[in-house]
Amino acid sequence: MELSNKVAIVTGAASGLGRATAEELLKRGAKVVIFDLNVEQGKAVASELGERCVYAEVNVADEASVQAGIAEALHAFGAVHICINCAGIGPAIKTFGSKGPHRLDIFKTVISVNLVGTFNVLRLAAEAMSLNDPLPGDGERGVIINTASVAGIEGQVGQVAYSASKGGIIG
C-alpha cells in the first residue's frame, strides 16, 4: 500500500512502539491519529509530530471510546486506511509470590486492554475501512496490523497476564 496521504490509526502512540510507528508512518507521507489514554503526553506528541498528526483520547477496551476516536479520525482526515494496534500494558506479577496469588482483577484488566482492546479497535476500524473505495488491482480498502510479543509464545516469570494476552493476539 502506498502510504502517501493515507490515514492511519495507531493505538498506544503517545510512547514506545506506538510512537515510533506513528513517526515512521508520517515520514512516509501518511496522516496519523494517535489513540491513547494519556491525554497530556498524547497531545504533546501530536503537536510535536506536526499538522498531519492528531490526538484522540481513546480507551481501546471501551466500544464507545473507540467509536468516538474513529469519528475524530474521519472528521480530521476523511477516512481510515490503516490501523496498527500497539496499545498494551504488562505489569510484572508472578502467578503466586510473596504477596500471595496474582490478583484476578489485574489479570482481567491486562486481557481487556491487550487482547479485547486489540479486537475492539480492529473490528471498528475494519467497519470504517469498508467505506473506502477499493484500490485498483487488488481491491484493498485498508490494512490492519496487530502487534504482539515473543512473550505470547514463551512467557517469562511475572508475565502470566501479558503472555496470555499476547498469545491470544498471535492466535
Image (cartoon, rainbow, N blue to C red):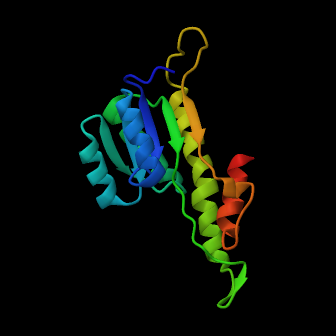
93 or 31, which is in the foreground?
93
Q: How many marks?
A: 0
Which residue occupies 74% across, 54% down? 153
**26 sits to left or right of 120:** left
Picture quadrant of residue 123: top right
Q: Can residue 68 be seen from the camera position used here? A: no
Image x and y of residue 50, in percent: 25, 39
Placement of 52 over or under 102, stated as above or below = above
129 or 31, which is in the foreground?
31
Q: Can residue 88 be seen from the camera position used here? A: yes
Which residue occupies 34% across, 35% down? 75
Placement of 101 over or under 47, stated as above or below = below
Which residue occupies 66% across, 68% down? 159
Image x and y of residue 73, in percent: 38, 38
Placement of 75 over or under 88, stated as above or below = above
Image x and y of residue 32, in percent: 38, 37
